Amino acid sequence: MNHRLIATSALASVLALGMLSTASAADAPAKEKCFGIVKAGANDCANLSGTHSCAGQASADNGVDEWKYVAKGTCASLGGKTAEEAKKAMKK
């Protein structure tokens, strides 16, 4: 009887943890890449020009090819560009 109670409690705990992790992932706010607003050393990953491939390696402020994640829908209000806009600006 005692073994059955322990097994049931363990199973319920595992199921509850699975539901919690799913809920927190669904609650995460949507993000988008925003180019041209990054301060030196504050980029999130590789740049469009391919001169580096890691976060934190932007060498200048507001490089058009550098990006970071922002809340979805806020990039334009921050003065940033989408990936397509940044690619066009790099060709000039």
Image: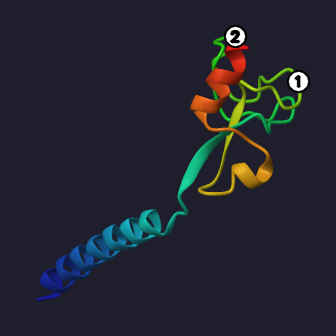
Question: Residue 21 vs residue 41: left or right?
Answer: left
Mark positioned earlier in the residue sequence (1 or 2): 2
Q: Is residue 77 visible?
A: yes
Snapshot colouring: rainbow
Q: Give amino acid for label 2.
A: Thr
The image position of residue 42, as x and y in percent, is 80, 35
Which residue corresponds to mark 2?
A: 51
Q: Secondary structure at mark 2?
A: loop
Q: Residue at x 74, y 33 (%)?
A: 43
Binning the other alpha carbons within 10 Å of mark 2 as few (below 14), some (14 to 19) or many (20 upward) gives few
Q: Secondary structure at mark 1?
A: loop
The image position of residue 83, as x and y in percent, is 59, 32
> Distance between the Cα atoms at labels 1 and 2?
13 Å
Q: Give amino acid for label 1.
A: Ala
For residue 88, above or below residue 10: above
In this rendered view, identify the residue nearer to me: 12 or 74. Answer: 74
- The reply to whether callout 1 and callout 2 are in contact (CB within 8 Å) is no
Q: Which image quadrant is residue 61 in?
A: top right
In the picture as drawn, the residue positioned furthest to the top comes out as: 51
The image position of residue 32, as x and y in percent, is 58, 47
Which residue corresponds to mark 1?
A: 60
Q: Residue at x 25, y 79 (%)?
A: 12
Quadrant of the frame with the N terminus: bottom left
